Image: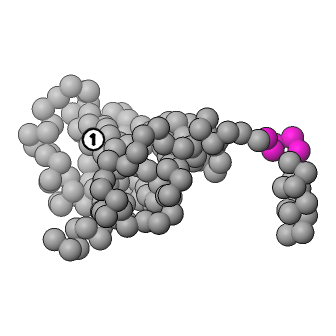
Amino acid sequence: MARAVKILEQLGVALNQAKTRIVNITRGFEFLGFKIQRGKGKFRLAPGRIKSKLNRQNLYAIPTQKSVDRFKDQVRALTRRKIPLRLGEVIETINPIIRGWGNYYCRSHVRKRFHQLDGWIIRRLWSHRTKRWRNTAWREYPTKRLRTEFKLVSLVSLIPSLQIAKGLS
């Protein structure tokens, strides 16, 4: 801790003793909405397929549960069943929130989480449209139609590594 204080003082930064703590990287820590920790296993990809040289220590950053919950609360508030807006208007209001949250977290380890949230957002929109949770709105408004006709932003499409792969194929 003394060494860190000395280095930061040379940089002109003061260390807040009340907030600062030393943690083991295997337990991880939360910082600016990210949980950073060492992964439990090895990469599933072959070493030749890994393009990034940044993750040699098997470290991962994921959105904290608190951040995911706050994002879901924002979307939930805008897709309430009692809101008297058309589906296109609702999508126009939630697109900036989806895009902003997704662009903030897109460089972390979020592919599975983004896929789950994309499905949840679509179910929220179906629920808003038919005024109930279990419904058949998927027949009238399939996911493809929501993405093309209504221009619903997909969180998965914001991941930079997937955009490059899409461009190659």
> Does residue 163 sit above or below 90 in this rendering?
below
Front residue of 155 and 24: 24
Q: Position of residue 42 (x, y in %)?
A: 40, 45
Residue 20 in magenta stretch: yes
**Looking at the image, which residue is at 56% across and 37% down?**
66
Residue 130 in magenta stretch: no
* Left or right: residue 27 compared with residue 59: right
SS at mark 1 in the image:
helix
Q: Residue furthest bottom?
A: 168
Q: Sort mark 1 into few (<14), some (14-19) or many (20+) by Cα contacts within 10 Å.
A: some
Q: Quadrant of residue 149?
A: bottom left
**Which amino acid does the dot numbered 1 rest on?**
Gly
Q: Position of residue 124 (x, y in %)?
A: 31, 37
Q: Quadrant of residue 117?
A: top left
Q: Main secondary structure of the magenta part?
A: loop
Front residue of 21 and 72: 21
Front residue of 99 and 92: 99
In the image, which residues are magenta? 17-21
**Looking at the image, which residue is at 34% across and 59% down?**
47
**Looking at the image, which residue is at 25% across and 27% down?**
132
**Residue tagged by mark 1?**
119
Q: Is residue 85 visible?
A: no
Number of numbered discs: 1
* Left or right: residue 67 compared with residue 86: right
Front residue of 150 and 154: 154
Q: Position of residue 49 (x, y in %)?
A: 30, 63
> Does residue 59 sit above or below 133 in this rendering?
below
